[in-house]
Amino acid sequence: MFGLFLYSKLTFNDKIKHMKTNISIIALFLIVLSCGTKTGANLDLAIKASNDLATKTDANKNLTELKTEGALTDKDGFKDVGSFQHSVFYDKKTNELFKIQNTEITDKTIIETYYFASNNVYLIVSESQQTPTKRVYVKKRKTISSENINSEEENLLLHKALYFQKEFKKSH
């Protein structure tokens, strides 16, 4: 009641200033709210675009596959603990890298697939028996979203993607 009493004592110009301030606050709130919604929508679009591009890459039969197989050893390099298969999919004419699939077979099988476009990794998928599929969505070498993965594994997969890409560039 007291606030209402003070408001009635304000001059017309002061009331206009208060109204402008209130309208500005409401407008700022609406702008922030709309940008927040747009960011979520943009992330959803980026994830969908990444998944669509990966599907298109998987279906591309014109890519050249370069396959390497070998033994996985313990940390000292002496005892065989499993095997690996490493496949690189690229355009032979342009040497553009599209996909790397790394399979490691020990007491369990892990299949990691790294997707590239315009010389940048954009999606990493890691599949293993009896665990949910892990996905890392990447933009400009930074994670923009991930599923079923902790930050340590996420960083490891991202570093592996960059390492595999670097090795591909050395040989092509």
Image (cartoon, helix red, strand yellow):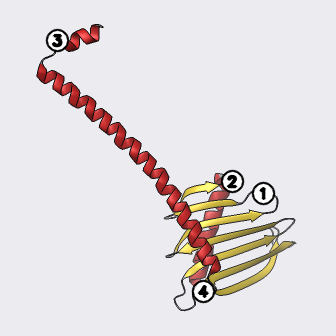
Q: CA distance from mark 4 to mark 2?
A: 33 Å
The residue where tag 1 is placed is: 131
Q: Residue furthest bottom?
A: 93
Q: CA distance from mark 2 to mark 3?
A: 60 Å
The residue where tag 3 is placed is: 9
Residue situated in front as seen by the camera: 48 or 169? 48
| Identity, as a three-letter code, of the amino acid under mark 1 | Thr
Across the whole image, how many numbered discs are drawn on residues?
4
Above or below 111: residue 19: above
Q: Find residue 171 and name its label.
A: 4
Does the rendering let one see residue 142? no
Disc with the residue nearer the chain's start (4 vs 2): 2
Q: Residue 48 in the image: x percent, y percent?
A: 55, 63
Task: Classify mark 4: residues with Cα within 10 Å, few (<14), some (14-19) or many (20+).
Answer: few
Q: Residue 107 in the image: x percent, y percent?
A: 87, 65
Task: Classify mark 2: residues with Cα within 10 Å, few (<14), some (14-19) or many (20+).
Answer: few
Q: Are marks 4 and 3 in contact (CB under 8 Å)?
A: no
Disc with the residue nearer the chain's start (2 vs 3): 3
Disc with the residue nearer the chain's start (4 vs 3): 3
What SS does tag 1 mark?
Answer: loop
